[in-house]
Amino acid sequence: MSTLLPPPGEIAKIPVDWVEERSGLVSFGKFMLFRNVPKDISWLQTLGSALLTVFILQVTTGILLAMYYQPDPDTAWTTIKFITDDATLGWLVRGMHKWGSSVMVVLLFLHMGRTFLFGAYKYPREMTWITGAIIFIMVMGMSFTGYLLVFDERAYWATIVGVNINGTAPILGPALSWILMVGPQISTHTLSRFYALHMLVIPSLLGGLIFVHMLLVVRLGVTSPPWSRMQVTEGDV
Amino acid sequence: MPRLTARERRESYQREYAFQKKHGKSFFPNAVFHDTIVSLIVVALIMGMAILWHAQFGSVPGEAEAGRIGGLLGPAYEAKADPGVLAYDPRPEWYFFFLFELLRLFKEPALLIVGSVIIPTIWMVLLIGWPFIDRNPDRRLSRRPIALALGVMVPIVLLTLTFYGSKAPGAGGAVSTEPGAAAFANGPCSTCHTLANAGTAGNVGPVLDEAKPDYETALNLITNGKGGMPAFKGQYTADQISCLAGYVATWSGATGTTPGPSAPSAKATYPASCEAAGGDFAGVAAAGG
């Protein structure tokens, strides 16, 4: 019987080959990982992947928080208090989500500044910049909608001021305020709406856009720094 | 270098990049190694901030439902939001301070929209459309003077706005003993409005010492709100609104103990309405709020 079995090294390949043959997932992974980047890329070009890490961290801690949080004006604050004071390591999960958002905004500015100074938004990477700019605006939207959820005094009044600032825009402004608050003032529906925006609408759009942004980066390749000395010499390529 | 057409320039870049890629290194494990180190540092930083934040918490509040104080990195949480409690100084999260400060630069109600809508919209359009605006094909900073100037100026402007935004005053200063002053200074008015008599220095909304609204205008604005200003109808009683409007009309633009130019408009109702409203009502939940 034993002669019919392939050697052990081959057995491990069977499921991998099975998946590859039916999805091409393995070659996709190889395409993402085993591609060449210019020899002289710099440490400054690690900020994008750091942002991806923080995004994954925000998703993970956000899911954990959602398991305890209730988007109801009567209980929202109590569940935040429970997470912070009583739940095992709840303070760490909430703290990392809270400070993760600040770190994410700082990293976004640095990543954008690096792209700007490298001129990395120029041909052929214009679309990578545009998706990145929309990601930036969406992250600011995540921060704004997340702020209300704690439902303490600070969250409540800062959101009122924020929504009213939106409301100063002509024509669309008052309508936007009304849509955000679901009426003239913050109510039960406001909190559910912010919760839905914060953990369903914006994150799914954001996740999709980050995926597109990354595909573009892989397709177009990482730029070499503008001070790169690598030049095409005659007869090469 | 001879002048190239746009098409030749694009082809030249593709050639150059193909060369760099051919003579480059594999993304895995070279770049992945650097990425992993930076990601680990960032995660450690976030965890460190959470730990520092937690380390400075005060004791767990009891059933009194107060907030839990913190240290350098702020409280664990503040008291539960209560629409009835109007004595609050709202502040955005720090990364919106630049926007907050931008609003303070446009104090006139007619100009508020410049800071709240027009400038942010222009900024967003510039941000998204930047690759189409900057047509200079060169990537070296020495050949991109305009981009370099912008790249230096924009962070300086943002950091300056953020810095002043963080210092933006809410309530504070000496409060006069005039009827309505305490309610004004301790209530939500103080967050956005400067009124010397009440000792407040908010700059989100108009400076009342400059606007000097008459009684009817103030009454209407407090009742119904306008633009960034919330409507307080339902949060304050009619007497309380009348008291605040009378106080604002009387003491905005005042010099010392001489009432301001709009004072006569409030004569009939002020300060009688403040007595009816019951002194400093800033922190008192209005019935039926």
Image (cartoon, rainbow, N blue to C red):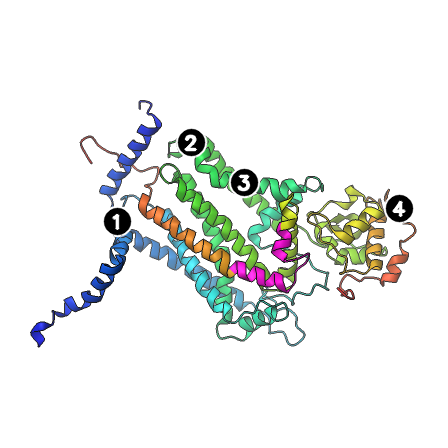
Report the number of discs: 4
At numbered mark 1, what does the secondary structure look like: helix, strand or loop?
loop
Classify B81 as above or below A2.
Answer: above
Q: Secondary structure at mark 2?
A: loop
Q: Chain of mark 3?
A: B
Same chain for the residues at labels 2 and 1, yes or no?
no
Residue B184 quadrant: bottom right
Q: Is residue A144 visible?
A: yes
Disc 2 to disc 3: CB gap under 8 Å = no
Q: Position of residue A83 (x, y in %)?
A: 53, 71
First in sequence: mark 2 vs mark 4: 2
Tell me, yes or no, whether dots 2 and 3 are on the same chain: yes
Residue placed furthest toward the right: B268
Q: Which kind of residue does numbered mark 4 sit on? A: Ser
Q: Residues within 10 Å of mark 4 (few under 14, many from 20)?
A: some
> How far is disc 4 from disc 3 in space, using C-alphas?
43 Å
**Magenta segment, which residues?**
A176-198
User: Picture coordinates of residue A230 (x, y %)?
Assistant: 27, 37
A142 and B28: which one is in front?
Answer: A142
Indicate yes or no whether the magenta region holds residue A187.
Answer: yes
What is the residue that sits farthest to the left in this orientation? A3
Check disc 3 and report the residue beneath it. B123
Q: Going 57% across and 50% down the picture, which residue do you hit? A: B96
Q: Give the residue at x 44% y 33%.
A: B134
Does residue A196 appear left or right of residue B228 in this picture?
A: left
Q: What's the CA distance linking mark 2 and mark 1?
A: 29 Å
Q: Residues within 10 Å of mark 1 (few under 14, many from 20)?
A: some
Q: Are marks 1 and 3 on the same chain?
A: no
Q: Which residue is mark 4?
A: B265
